[in-house]
Amino acid sequence: MTTTERMRRFSGRRELEELIQTCISIENRRFNPFLLDIAEALSIIRRHSNQLRTLEDHLLDMRAITSVARVVGLQSAHLRFQSSSLFIDPSMVRQKLESLSREQLAEFLLLSWHPIVELEQLTLASTKEAKEFWEHMLSFFERRKRLQLGPFDNPAATDLGELARMRVVDEKAYTRKMQDLWNELKERAGEDETVDYWNFIKASNFAHTVIRAQLVSFLVSYGYANLQRKGNTMLLVPNAKPDPHPKGSPLSFPIPITKEALVRAK
């Protein structure tokens, strides 16, 4: 065997061993199965097939063919999984788009385009149609007669009391409500100078209770009263006059006003 033949044989064995190691790495999920070019791998095996001399060479060739076959199996399984899950590889989509012409791309765009916005504009024909529609429309009173609604009541003025009953406006200004509640707090505090929070906001119904709790929160925020917490008890302490700049850092007490909380407090 000449030196050249020995070099070719050595080079062929090294390429086959590298191919086998690459296939083993793919089988161990270290690389994507499609990173191996099957055609190139088969050409390597075919190129060195005429250099097989010993049993060791034939075994190495068999290992290479078997390794490539297993990678082909992994590629096939990968494609079956993607097709069953309706998965499209981004690189395949990119290759497909790059192979299309401008005319084909425009055709596919028109086929898949479903606009959700429609542009409308005034034209002479639409303006004429609208004018004829309004000219032929009966008056409001003529159209009302067809509904048989009876006599028509002219609009009348509504006083403040009626608007308050309809809950359109408040009968009493918000500032006045706060002032009245502050006076009530001072009267109920008396000599003890404190009032239990839950007992003070409690009203005849749940909606009124929530309104009183909201007003109390503004009394505390604007310095009309202080809120003290002692264990599970909360006490309201009215101030003799509003203190717009209370001493110390301001604190927030999140108090959930629910029917269950009212029952527990009671």
Image: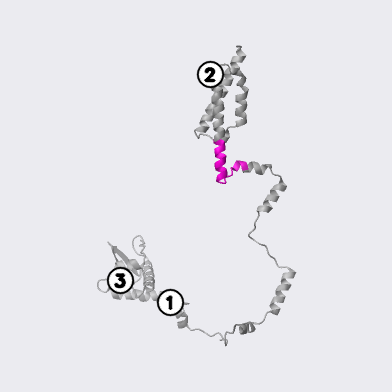
- Residue 85 among those drawn in magenta: yes
Residue with the mark numbered 1: 173
Q: Mark 1 or mark 3: name the one nearer the start of the chain.
A: 1
Residue with the mark numbered 2: 56
Residue 240 visible at all:
no
Real-space CA distance between mark 1 and mark 2, rounded to the nearest whole angstrom: 102 Å
Q: At x 62% / y 43%, what residue is drawn? A: 93
Is mark 1 in CB contact (under 8 Å) with mark 3? no
- Residue 112 among those drawn in magenta: no
Label 2 neighbour load within 10 Å: few <14, some 14-19, many 20+ = few
Image location of residue 22, percent across then percent down: 54, 29
Q: At x 36% / y 76%, what residue is drawn? A: 180
Q: Mark 2 or mark 3: name the one nearer the start of the chain.
A: 2
Span colored in magenta: 74-92
Q: Quadrant of residue 154?
A: bottom right
Real-space CA distance between mark 1 and mark 3, rounded to the nearest whole angstrom: 24 Å
| Residue type beneath disc 2 | Glu
Image location of residue 110, percent across then percent down: 68, 53
Seen in the picture, residue 48 relative to 262 is either above or below; the reply is above
Which image quadrant: the C terminus? bottom left
Image location of residue 133, percent across then percent down: 70, 76
Q: At x 54% / y 42%, what residue is drawn? A: 81
Q: Quadrant of residue 35?
A: top right
Q: Which disc, if any, is residue 199?
A: 3
